[in-house]
Image (tube, rainbow, N blue to C red):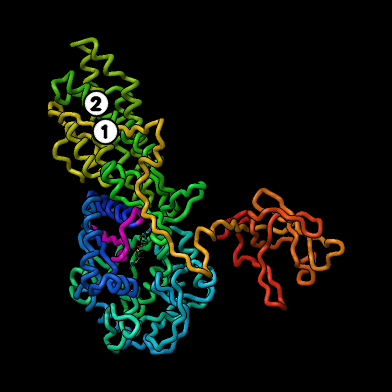
């Protein structure tokens, strides 16, 4: 029997669970269920990341102890997983002793091997990310709550393992997936990586795992959190279970935490002498559509998160699971919107699947005493349906193995559609009008084949919609489904069908109301605070920064500092007047890709129209155009 060990990230206990957390966890659940149904022995791990500055600050703000704060926050995740039908095998919290002991054990081992040293550090620290950031990162402006910190700390010799890691990634093409994420990491590893600061002085932060060789310090949250993947299956405490599960088959993560998983984690494992996980798979983000139609990430700090509980309460768990799995191409970003949810629900679930089961069930119930009819002689089109049914399981399984869950669902729904077409072709309802005799017998055969095909399709959808599938299976005569056999030929003639109850009632969108306002799940809006010398995020995003390619440059008469540039912004050509003369020659400008403000009202400068403005840095002596560190198409947005 094969084993399959899958993990989700452990979520920050402070966060309010949202659709992004729900997505990763449902995806892991679908893969875990799928492997169980294949007959694999599965260990599905999820949990909570409970240490760090944010937790300590939140607890202080509430006037409670950090542990109490965590204990009070943790159930929100457990309740959501319960509601979402998440079949996890273990739920780890980093404040548990079984985890803390292992963190200390690994730290001590890494220290003893000489891979940890003490040094002074001065740098920018992002409290929201819980890590030191480089000057370059700070300049991106993407980090909030950044402060300068100088302190003695312990360092892990991460740089020492850089070459080994690069070699490992080359030798194991499946280690980081999808491939574009592997390339991203290899790109980062082309530059030298710094050693990793892995401690925090207790004077600044108390809420962490104490460093075993210096009790004035606690462990940096990421060094602590990543180790959950080995502490839960029994590293250092139970050799047998650890040997059984490790290395993990897949760490499922969002693209936002790729660097910590694909650089910090493997180098930590190299140092501790633990084998690396087989695969780190990074999925994309769920984005929401803003009022102007642009997509933006869902995040707590932007205040635009969709609360999965609202959706579940309104439409049920399984449709939400279905939508999230069907809609996101694994590895890419996806837009979440209520209208696409309703569209998908109505077309796939209410129309294609719901109507099919309803038709088969009603025709059998009304015409065959509610019992599955006997299948007569197989005709060509029956054989065609059976043949598809016999091969569909392997096709869907192949897609899941390749982490193409959305395609697996799509293939299954196409099969459902082909069953509808089969019914339309044979019209058993017309055959039944002939009363007893050959017409009814043929209708019986057609309905039996249709029921068996639906049964198969349902079986393939079981990891995605476990509850609804059980309900629907009873309506086509499968009362004790055995999910480990997806093969054709399970249903038995003469078995009674459960009564039909519409499992996916159509969602009607009222025409004369504005469904968006009425039905859009609540967004957790928190107004960002803006002080005197700061602008709000909303102000900042009004500036439309874009990449432009310079295609021509000319002097402007009687204006010795100005140049007239022609630039390409996507398909559009514009003219921009800029004070570049004396800093750049006319020849060196064409071909350069620069950043422009694309939504600046046009103005005449020395009588020449300028449609936008370019960005350049100026220290009084040198003027330098803002350009790119890797190529990107003109017209791309700068955020
Ligand atoms: N605690 C760290 C992870 C430590 S793992 C050793 C952390 N936690 S988190 O609460 O911020 O959760 C991050 C994960 O939530 C992401 O990697 C991703 O799996 C999921 N998502 C959060 N927002 C998301 C979207 N908008 N869309 C999709 N998934 C996202 O980082």
Q: Quadrant of residue 227?
A: bottom left
- Looking at the rendered image, the quarter that the C terminus falls into is bottom right
Specify the quarter for ligand 1: bottom left
Q: Is residue 230 visible?
A: no
Give the Cα separation between the discs numbered 1 and 2. Answer: 9 Å
Question: Which stretch did the figure color magenta?
Answer: 1-20
Q: Quadrant of residue 208?
A: bottom left
Say which mark, if any, is on residue 54: none
Q: Is residue 82 magenta?
A: no
Whether tag 1 and tag 2 are in contact, CB under 8 A, the answer is yes
- Looking at the rendered image, the quarter that the N terminus falls into is bottom left
Image vertical order of residue 244 relative to residue 155, above or below: above
Q: Which residue is mark 1?
A: 454
Q: Judge from the rendering whether residue 171 lies leftward or rightward of residue 348; answer left or right.
A: right
> Percent x, y for residue 308?
31, 50
What residue is shown at x 32% (from left), y 83% (from top)? Answer: 110
Q: Which residue is mark 2?
A: 360
Q: Local crowd at mark 1 within 10 Å, few (<14), some, or many (≥20)?
A: many
Q: Local crowd at mark 2 within 10 Å, few (<14), some, or many (≥20)?
A: many
Local secondary structure at mark 2:
helix
> Percent x, y for residue 226?
32, 71
Q: Is residue 19 magenta?
A: yes
> Percent x, y for residue 230?
27, 71
Could you say which is closer to the camera, residue 344 or residue 528? 528
Local secondary structure at mark 1:
helix
Image vertical order of residue 245 relative to residue 161, above or below: above
Q: Judge from the rendering whether residue 497 lies leftward or rightward of residue 528; answer left or right.
A: left
Label 1 or label 2, whichever comes before in sequence order? 2
What residue is shown at x 69% (from left), y 71% (from top)? Answer: 624
What residue is shown at x 22% (from left), y 56% (from top)? Answer: 79
Q: Judge from the rendering whether residue 557 lies leftward or rightward of residue 133; answer left or right.
A: right
Q: Quadrant of residue 236?
A: bottom left
């Amino acid at each position: 029997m094969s084993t399959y060990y899958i993990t989700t990230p452990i979520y920050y206990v402070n966060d309010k669970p949202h659709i992004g957390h729900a997505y990763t966890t449902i995806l892991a659940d679908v893969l875990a269920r799928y492997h169980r149904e294949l007959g694999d022995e599965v260990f599905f791990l999820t949990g909570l990341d409970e240490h760090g500055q944010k937790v300590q600050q939140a607890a202080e703000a509430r006037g409670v102890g950090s542990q109490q704060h965590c204990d009070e926050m943790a159930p929100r995740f457990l309740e959501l997983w319960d509601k979402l039908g998440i079949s996890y095998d273990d739920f780890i919290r980093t404040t548990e002793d079984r985890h803390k002991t292992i963190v200390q054990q690994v730290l001590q081992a890494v220290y003893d091997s000489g891979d940890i040293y003490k040094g002074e550090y001065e740098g920018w620290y992002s409290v929201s990310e819980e890590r030191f950031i480089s000057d370059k990162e700070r300049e991106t402006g993407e980090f909030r709550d950044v402060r300068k910190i100088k302190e003695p700390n312990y360092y892990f010799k991460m740089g020492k393992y850089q070459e080994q890691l690069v070699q490992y990634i080359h030798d194991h093409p499946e280690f980081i997936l999808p491939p574009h994420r592997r390339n991203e990491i290899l790109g980062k590893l082309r530059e030298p990586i710094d050693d990793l600061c892995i401690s925090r002085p207790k004077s600044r932060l108390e809420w962490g795992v104490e460093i075993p060789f210096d009790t004035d310090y606690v462990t940096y949250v990421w060094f602590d959190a990543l180790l959950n993947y080995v502490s839960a299956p029994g590293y250092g405490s139970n050799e047998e279970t650890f040997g059984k599960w490790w290395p993990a088959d897949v760490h499922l993560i969002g693209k936002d935490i790729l660097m910590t998983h694909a650089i910090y984690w493997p180098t930590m494992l190299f140092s501790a002498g633990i084998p690396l996980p087989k695969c780190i798979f990074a999925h994309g983000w769920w984005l929401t559509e803003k009022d102007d139609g642009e997509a933006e990430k869902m995040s707590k700090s932007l205040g635009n998160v969709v609360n999965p509980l609202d959706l579940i309460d309104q439409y049920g768990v399984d449709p939400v699971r279905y939508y999230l799995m069907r809609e996101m191409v694994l590895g890419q970003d996806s837009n979440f919107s209520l209208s696409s949810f309703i569209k998908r629900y109505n077309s796939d679930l209410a129309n294609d699947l719901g109507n099919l089961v309803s038709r088969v069930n009603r025709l059998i119930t009304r015409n065959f005493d509610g019992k599955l009819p006997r299948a007569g002689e197989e005709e060509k089109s029956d054989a065609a349906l059976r043949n598809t049914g016999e091969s569909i399981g392997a096709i869907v399984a192949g897609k899941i193995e390749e982490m193409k869950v959305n395609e697996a669902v799509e293939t299954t729904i196409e099969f459902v559609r082909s069953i509808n077409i089969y019914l339309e072709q044979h019209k058993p309802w017309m055959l039944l009008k002939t009363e007893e005799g050959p017409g009814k017998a043929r209708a019986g055969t057609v309905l039996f084949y249709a029921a068996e095909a639906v049964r198969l399709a349902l079986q393939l959808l079981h990891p995605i919609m476990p509850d609804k599938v059980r309900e629907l299976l009873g309506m086509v005569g499968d009362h004790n489904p055995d999910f480990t056999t997806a093969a054709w030929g399970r249903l038995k003639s003469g078995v009674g069908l459960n009564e039909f109850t519409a499992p996916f009632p159509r969602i009607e969108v009222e025409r004369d109301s504005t469904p968006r306002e009425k039905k859009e799940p609540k967004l957790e809006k928190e107004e960002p605070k803006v002080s005197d010398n700061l602008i709000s995020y909303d102000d900042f995003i009004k500036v439309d920064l874009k990449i432009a390619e310079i295609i021509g440059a000319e002097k402007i008469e009687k204006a010795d500092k100005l140049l007239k540039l022609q630039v390409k912004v996507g398909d559009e050509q514009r003219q921009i007047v800029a004070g570049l003369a004396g800093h750049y020659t006319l020849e060196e400008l064409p071909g350069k890709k620069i950043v422009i403000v694309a939504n600046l009202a046009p103005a005449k400068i020395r009588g020449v129209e300028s449609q936008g403005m370019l960005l350049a840095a100026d220290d009084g002596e040198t003027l330098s155009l803002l350009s790119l560190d890797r190529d990107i198409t003109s017209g791309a947005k700068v955020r």
